Amino acid sequence: MGNDSSFVDTLRKEGTFAPSTDLINKLLSCAKEIRIKPGGIVVGYGATDTGIYIVKEGIIQLLYFKGDKEVTFGFAFPGTFMCSPQSVYMNQPAVIQIESCKTASTVLRISKEDFFSMMRESNEFALWMFDIAMGQFYTSELKMIQINGSAEERYRNLLRFRPDIASAISSNRMASYLGVTPSWLCKIRKKLLYE
């Protein structure tokens, strides 16, 4: 797989720990590039997929199902690492689904074996992955602070703090992320137009 320098820079800036170019290139040499069509599934709910993925292009949605309702709990952008923790950690079927948003996406898949081999071999890699994991915990906590309040407040905060998400996803996915119905989101948007 070819390693373009701009993507290497994107990966280096994903957390607060800056790994060496050699380490990033070693990781990328283990990766298989997969093109995902709009709305295509990377990891399907109920499938056991022990791969670790990195978004190379596009925006990826992470969701789970609550009864017959789809609940979006996050998005992944270029440079973001993602996986089904249930599959990777416990070798059990995924309870989340990972899929592409409105546009086609490209992801890199690294096998669990290659990933953990690098963890055992490289202290630098282990530190980098710890930093990535802590960054994802931090982002989850930040979301609880920033995307809260009434439905209207959550929408305003999404526009304020995450305009990249607001402009890149469909209304249905945005409604799911905010925890409202699409018709309720439409009412909120109309109200804000007249302010």
Image: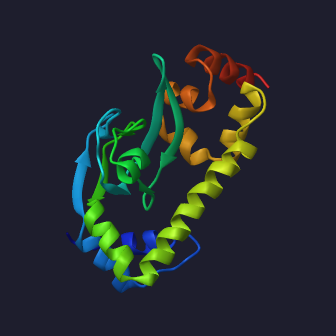
- Name which residue lies at 67% across and 40% down: 159
Between 146 and 57, the residue placed more toward the observer is 146
Quadrant of the rendered image containing residue 68: top left
Residue 129: give x, y in percent of width and height. Answer: 47, 69
Between 105 and 54, the residue placed more toward the observer is 54
For the C terminus, give its image quadrant: top right
Q: Is residue 195 visible?
A: yes
Relative horizontal placement of residue 95, taking residue 72 as reference (left or right): left
Name the outermost residue toward the front: 90
- Name which residue lies at 59% across and 73% down: 16
- Name which residue lies at 53% across and 42% down: 74
Quadrant of the rendered image containing residue 186: top right
Q: Is residue 114 above or below residue 137?
A: below
Q: Is residue 56 above or below residue 70?
A: below
Residue 155: give x, y in percent of width and height. Answer: 68, 32
For the N terminus, give its image quadrant: bottom left
